[in-house]
Every structure is written in C-alpha cells, then in structure tokens.
Image (cartoon, rainbow, N blue to C red):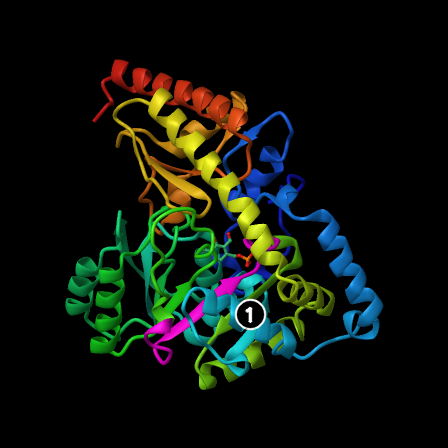
Amino acid sequence: MSPEIIFDPYTNLYSEATSLTRSSEVRDLMSVTGRADIISFAGGLPYIEGLPHEDITAAMETVIRESYTEAFQYGETEGKGTLKEMLVEVMAREGLHAEPEHVLITTGSQQALDLLARTLIDPGDPIVIEGPTYIGALTAFRPADPGFITVPLDEDGMQIDVLAAKLAGLEGPPPKFIYVVPNFHNPGGVTMSGERRRDLLALAEKYDLLIIEDNPYGLLRFEGEPCEPLASHDRRRVVYVSTLSKIISPGIRTGWVLAPAPIFDRLVNLKQSADLCSPSLSQLFAEQFLRQGLWNKNLDNIRPIYRSRRDAMLQSLEEYFPEEARWTRPQGGLFIWVELPRYLDSAKMLPLSILQKVAYVPGAAFYVGGAGSNFMRLNFSFAEEDRIAEGIKRLSKVVKKEMVLYRSLGLDH
Ligand SMILES: Cc1ncc(COP(=O)(O)O)c(C=O)c1O
C-alpha cells in the first residue's frame, strides 16, 4: 500500500474482487531489496547481465529496420503467428508437440493465470493448488474467490496420494482445476517425478478434471534427466502455461498458454478486454531472438552460472545454517526452499534480517490460510557467489539468534 494512504475515502466504491486482492509480499519487499546495500535472495530475478548484449542490440535493430510499422502498431489478440511457430519449437525442446493455432500469446504468463482464473472460477468453486504454491498464482486466483484445496509437496512434487484421498473425500462439486508447477517449483525447488506425473494424469482422468501446468523453469535444468511435460501426454485435460521471462527476459513480458480450442476461444475474448493484444515490439523482438538461436546461447550461458550459484548457496547453508534446518537441492530453476525449526516465524524474523542487510521471502506468503511460517524461499540466480556466501552467513546468525531467544523463553516447541 502507498505510504501516504491513511484514510481511504473510496472504500465503499470497491468491488468484492478487489477486496480479495492483496499486495504481494514479494512486490512489497522489492522496494527495500532493490537497495544496493542489501543482499537479496527475495526476488525471482533472472540474471539479465548474462544476456548477449550485442546480439540483443542487433536483433532489436533488425526489428526496427525490417518491421517498423508492425512493431509500433496494434497486433492480433491471439499473438503474432510467426512468434507462435517459434514457441512451438521451444515447447518441442521439452517433448511437447503443439500447433501454433492453439497457442495464445499473453503479456507474461502471469496474464495467462489471470485469464484462466477468470475463465474457469466462479466464487466458491473448489480448485486444487500445491502447498506451497507460486505467489503470483494465488494473486491471480484470489479475486475469483475459489475454495482452495491445498495438497502438500515433498521431494517428488505434489503428493498424489494425498490428492487422491482429498478427491475421494470431497463432498459437493469437483475442483475446477489442479494447478501445478512440475519443474523446479517456485518456491519449493522440487520437480515432480515421472511416476507422480503419471499418477496425476490418471487421477485427472478418473475424476474428469482439468490440470493447469505452469512451466517457466523446465529449460533451466543444469543436472539430471528431464521429465516430459504433463501436456505432452494429454492435451485435452492439460492447459499448459509458459514464458520467455526466464529463458530471455521478464522485461519483454511475453508468455503463452496452450489450450484446447474451446478454452482458447474464451481466453482470447477475455484477453481482448484485458489489453487488446500483447506488445508488438516485444513479440517481434522475441521472434528474432528465438529465430536466430540466441535463446540457446543464452541458456548455455546462464545454466552454468545458476548452477555455480546454487552450489555456492547449498555449500554456505551446509556451513553456516543450524543443523535443525532442512532445505531442497534443486536440479535447476531459481529457488531453494528452507525449513526452519517449527517454532520460528520467518515473517517476524524478516525485519531483523533486513537490518543485517539480507532479504528472503517468508514461507507463509506461499500458502493459503497460515501454514508455512517456519519456511523461507531463497533465490540463488541473482546474487554473485561471494555475496551469496556473505548473505547466508548473515542470515544464519539471525536464525541462530532467534533460536537462542526462543529457547531461553522456553518457546522452542
Ligand atoms: C511458477 C511461475 N509462474 C508464472 C510466473 C510469471 O512469469 P511471467 O509473468 O514473467 O511470465 C512466474 C514468475 O516468477 C513463476 O515462478
């Protein structure tokens, strides 16, 4: 909220939906964590400095020289056909074979989540989410006022046996969809195993449910064997969402959704009311970047950087964090998910951490209804190795000090 708002005279004008929106904790934090003196593990920022600057300038010049009118004109709501053809190639890299006419280009994949929420959810409709889940998905789904059914994650992703039990015990209407981030989960860092993917698809079949598969990080794998997207096994039941934010840049705001034709049509109608079309300039630039194979160059460049930053963070956690803490060991992506002793509250600890000039995102932000308070999400892609080591060292002191305090008060249970 803006600091100057003390009294809001417009309160009785707001819709129900806006009162269900909350300012995301990540966004609120960004104002502080952007300061140069803070070591930030808070954002989900890719390493933009790693992009090939000269190639980018050349690609942008080509767009302006060869497609000036198109670049600065409105475009089709569905998105530019020639970019869709390139996105089909990006999906094929992960084993998902699609047709350009089923791809809707969105203004970031965040817009795809928002459009899906508005297309599918009526107030009170149940939907299934992972616990923890992506904050932006909660932000997108909340205004539609669903009933959230949370299924916990473990090392192999969503616990499908828990989902099965919840579905079996459900009274009332079935969930509108199951929302999952199967690769290098944000914030969990874990990847859904092949077996769990098969079980999830079988359950969706059994109960006739739709799955929303959100896959921004699949191509950011730096070790281990990739798993095929859920959508590659069932295009009728799986709506697939992805983005160029992590393989090119979040600044171009280019994402997409691959959906069955009837859902696709509804999404297009809603997108028309949201923004008419995604920016033509971004789409043309993205197309050039993909067509010239610069995305592969960029991925080859950033994967080893992220890997070495992940290693630096894991090593520092091992070295400095209390032995009661646990954390995930992601094989790709941007995040490590840390579990602290149950009695600690990572949201209460955050101001102390910021005083020590380190920031993270408290775990409760990734849950509906109060769970996750002893977890924190750490981003490893943004800070350099020496800053990571220093940041984790400082953070460990804050954690250990809190533990001593709780113990001395007898509150360590
Ligand atoms: C799981 C997940 N989905 C969607 C997004 C949104 O990405 P964008 O809107 O930049 O495409 C993010 C961004 O961090 C994410 O982590």
Relative to 405, 118 lies left or right: right
Residue 247 falls inside the magenta stretch: yes
Residue 182 falls inside the magenta stretch: no
Q: How many marks?
A: 1
Q: Is residue 124 in view?
A: no
- Judging from the image, what secondary structure is the residue with disc 1 in? helix
Q: Nearer the viewer, residue 137 or 328?
A: 328
Q: Which residues are magenta?
A: 232-249
Which residue is drawn at the image coordinates 27% and 29% (left, top)?
341
The residue that mark 1 highlights is: 87
Q: Is residue 131 above or below residue 174?
A: above
Is ligand 1 less than 8 Å from the beta carbon at label 1? no
Q: Please identify the quarter of the rendering in which residue 404 is found.
A: top left
Q: Nearer the viewer, residue 327 or 51?
A: 51
Location of the C terminus by quadrant is top left
Q: Amino acid at mark 1?
A: Leu
